[in-house]
Image (cartoon, grey):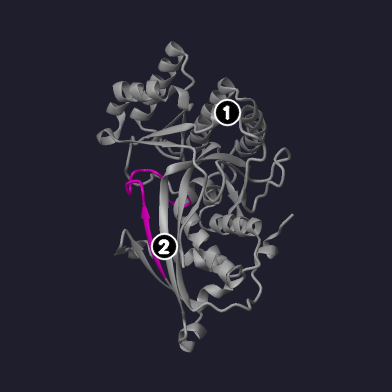
Amino acid sequence: MLTEKDFISKPFSSVIENGSFQWSAPSNIALVKYWGKKENQIPANPSISFTLNNCKTITKLSFAKNFDKLSVTNGNFYFDLLFEGKPKEDFKPKIQKFFERIEIYCPYLKDYHFTIDTENTFPHSSGIASSASGMAALAMNIMSLEKALNPAMTEDYFYQKASFLARLGSGSACRSIKGSVVVWGNHVEINDSSDLFGVEFPSTIHANFKNYQDTILLVDKGEKQVSSTVGHDLMHNHPFAEQRFAQAHHNLSSIKKVLETGDLENFIKIVESEALTLHAMMMTSLPYFILMKPNTLEIINKIWKFRNETKTPVCFTLDAGANVHILYPENVRENVLQFIKDELVGYCQNGNYICDAIGNGSQLIIDN
């Protein structure tokens, strides 16, 4: 079992003066939710997620050896940050904090000046969390540099450390590295599961869940009402925290069987219950928050009515916000999209929604 110490890089024999890499990394949607964390981004309970295909961040990392001895001895990180080709100063503190967190594991970072050029395939400020995809894409680029410095690195270690680093930037980012279905957090029934990084779901996934669809209804594209950090912190001393953590372990055991057997009925029950539990925890914390909007509830009720009347295996899940992810098998895609157009688009801000599906994780675009 790997520990944090195993991810501390040793001195390298290779020297690389400059170059660039470019990776894409997707967003993900949790089926069993991670909510509540310990120090150093360790989850209070395990989670499992679908990796998405279309909603992704594309990040290019250019680097040049820093030969200015004064700047190196100053002990600073040197980087420029561009978002969609333009300087984005308000993103820089988050990257600075990320570099500070991972420095012990990647001490070579201070040897280089970096230019980080990043963009999303989905609209900025759309209400879709970009921190998971953004930190995952950056972590993949950093690991490409480390592998160039240490060519003997194994592929398994490359992806485990990338997930480990991404977690230190944004907890759920560790689930955006590799795999269509990813588990993060120790769980007795998931082989090699870890609090330190995400692992691919170890069992064969039933055909019912191949190319599963996720249509994201953009109910509210404004800034998040509560930051993830604040939301997770509300689980400390929460009156129902321990029951919630136990529930997550139980639901992960249950959904493991569901994904193996193709049981769509129980998939729906677990996924919707998890979504509503997440929001219930926010409503019963101190301070308390209601993250759903009236249109969120209208959509949920419409989905329930449609499912009952048509027997279509469609369900919803939610992140810590008002937007609704509609999940359904590919073989009912035409009917569900027609239902969305006919009955749900009116509840979306400016009629906006995004069609997505299960993907395969991060992809290397440029290596030079």
User: Is 312 within the magenta?
Assistant: no
**Tags 2 and 1 in contact by the CB under 8 Å rule?**
no
* Residue at the image position 41 percent from the left and 39 percent from the top: 321
Residue 97 is situated, as x and y percent measured from the top left of the image, at 48, 65
Q: Amino acid at mark 2?
A: Lys
User: Residue 115 is drawn in which quadrant?
Assistant: bottom left
For the question of whether residue 326 can be seen, the reply is yes
User: Badge 1 is on which residue?
Assistant: 207
Say few, some or many: other residues with alpha carbon within 10 Å of mark 1 (under 14 / 14 to 19 / 20 or more): few
Q: Is residue 183 left or right of residue 316?
A: right
User: Residue 1 is drawn in which quadrant?
Assistant: bottom right
Q: Secondary structure at mark 1?
A: helix
Q: Is residue 194 left or right of residue 181?
A: right
* Residue 60: assigned label: 2
Q: Amino acid at mark 1?
A: Ala
Bounds of the magenta segment: 115-132
Q: Is residue 280 or residue 295 the one in the foreground? A: 295
Q: Is residue 151 or residue 85 the one in the foreground? A: 151
Q: Give the CA distance from mark 2 to mark 1.
A: 35 Å
Q: Is residue 124 left or right of residue 192?
A: left
User: Is 120 within the magenta?
Assistant: yes
Task: State which tag comes first along the sequence, 2 or 1.
Answer: 2
Q: How many marks?
A: 2
Say few, some or many: other residues with alpha carbon within 10 Å of mark 2 (under 14 / 14 to 19 / 20 or more): many
Residue 27 is situated, as x and y percent measured from the top left of the image, at 46, 46
- Does residue 33 sit above or below 67 in this rendering? above
- Does residue 268 sit above or below 55 in this rendering? above
* Residue at the image position 62 percent from the left and 70 percent from the top: 150
Residue 228 is situated, as x and y percent measured from the top left of the image, at 47, 48
For the question of whether residue 77 can be seen, the reply is no
Q: Is residue 179 or residue 341 the one in the foreground? A: 179
